Amino acid sequence: MQEHGTLRLFKRGPSVDVRLFLLLVLCLALLVVDARSALLAPVRQALAVAIYPFQRVALAPRDAMDYIDSWTHAATLARDEQDALRRQHIEMAQLSTHAAQLAAENEQLRRLLNISEEISQHSVAVEVFYVPPNFFSHRLVFNKGTRDGIRPGMPVIDEGGVVGQIIRVTPYSSEAALLIDDQVSIPVQVLRNGLRLIAFGSNEVGKIEVRYLTASADVREGDTLVTSGIGGLFPAGLPVGRIEKVDRDPGTGFAMAVAQPLSHPERYRHFLVLRVDVDGAPGPSQEAAHE
Amino acid sequence: MNNRASRGGTSSLAALQPIDASPFHRPSHPFFVWGTLLFAWVVSLLPWRMWQPTPDILLLVLAFWCLHEPRRVGLLTAFVLGLLMDVHDSELLGLHALGYVLVAYGAIVLRRRLEHFSTLVQALHMLPVLVVAATVVTLLGSWLNGEWAGWDWLWSALITAVLWPLADILLFLPQRRLDDADVNAV
């Protein structure tokens, strides 16, 4: 074969093998560091900010389509929504009077107990920016970030209940891990009897798991799990899931329950991020100190 | 191929090429190279990659330019683009980068041999490179995430290789047009 690249005699920089070796080592180092620690978070954030304009441009046609679509269907959509809302309104009216009464009573009791903290929740409505095409995790990226007061750790809810938790933020976007992601754990309790548990993302797609139950724990199929408010991040009383099956293992004396989340992150594009006080949340050490 | 030889005769240095040499390639315009890379990257930001067997267009364009324009596009470009994809996919940093660097290396190493072959043979050569890189990436990702990723990524590598001839047609379009213009001029 004829060599016709005499210019290649003059190499520029290190040879391609050396470069490959260096870059491979760098890649592996990045992978291990990123998998084991949060050291690279600033790097990721800087890159995320850098690619944000390109993401907006890439998704602009989709947003335009949605916009046009919503215009053309505006009338029917509005009518449907109005019907649904009116129905909800009637259902809520009674509840809300009851709630107002309870809130007033609660306020009074708090005053009596000298608890002065704010109990009403501020929240930010967010829209799904895109869903990262990542096989290993279940995430959503929203179109608002630290500029709107979103911080890592804040819970995300929809009308069904808890959707997930914010795990990364940039000034313009934020990333939430869904309940079904195995990085999320959430303190819950059984609505029926107040039994406190911890729910995790499950190996089963689209489910959550409650582990570390004693075999005699009073959990049944059909039980509703709500957040218990322990841990400080998730406000108490938000619906999380409904128990589908309970596996009791008499051999080990432990049981495990699988639950179906009550929220529907795959259906809607708008969610609510609750702006809880992330920094003031009691950490593990404080909880230990209480005991 | 005759037109190329005759064109060589008119200019000074290119005349030194033997008449039956492999097709002479004009270098692609740098703006075109970087423009196509940018375009492929922006296209990769679209949600269509949710489906796992989707071909990796960016990787295809990257490997193509590594093979044909190794002076402009090389391992470092592959690494940087890989990092950007990792950030977009909220993947562990370095996973895409590793795969892209491997494919770029494969393309650069195979370049000498592949320059002389047709696009179909080139695609056949690139297939194992793409599959090996995808395998390494998937095994590493599965190990670090503690979860097996299934087999659909193999399809992605296969479809990417199948698209190689198409990339050849599209990415050499400006040069073919120039060649045709030359023929008309002579």
Image: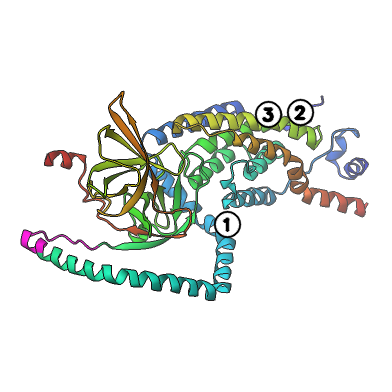
The colour scheme is rainbow
> Residue sitting at 49 percent across and 75 percent down?
A79
Where's the N terminus of chain A, which quadrant? top right
Cα separation, mark 1 vs mark 2, equals 37 Å
Question: Quick one: SS at disc 1?
Answer: helix
Work out whether B52 lies above or below A50: above
Where residue A282 sits: x, y (%)? 20, 46
Dot 2 lies on which element? helix
Q: CA distance from mark 1 to mark 3?
A: 31 Å
Q: Both on one chain, marks 1 and 2?
A: no
Which segment did they paint magenta? A109-120
- Residue at 8% across, 63% down: A111
Q: Chain of mark 3?
A: B
Q: Is residue A206 magenta?
A: no
- Looking at the rendering, which quadrant does residue A107 occupy? bottom left
Whichever of callouts 3 and 2 sits on the residue coming sooner in the sequence is 2
Q: Is residue A201 left or right of residue B126?
A: left
* Residue that badge 1 annotates: A58
- Quadrant (top left/top right/bottom left/bottom right) for the C terminus of chain A: top left
Looking at the rendered structure, the number of numbered marks drawn on it comes to: 3
Mark 2, residue position? B113
Which amino acid type is shown beneath numbered disc 1?
Ala
Observer-nearest of B50 and A187:
A187
Task: Identify the residue position indicated by label 3 in the image.
Answer: B128
Q: Are marks 1 and 3 on the same chain?
A: no
* A204 is higher (above) or lower (below) than A63: above
Camera-nearest residue between B28 and A225? A225
Per the model, the C-alpha gap separating discs 3 and 2 is: 15 Å
Instruction: Give how far across and how far down residue B149 sits, in percent.
Output: 53, 34
User: In which chain is the residue bearing label 1?
Assistant: A
Q: Position of residue A108 (x, y in %)?
A: 10, 66
Chain letter of the residue beneath label 2 in the structure image: B
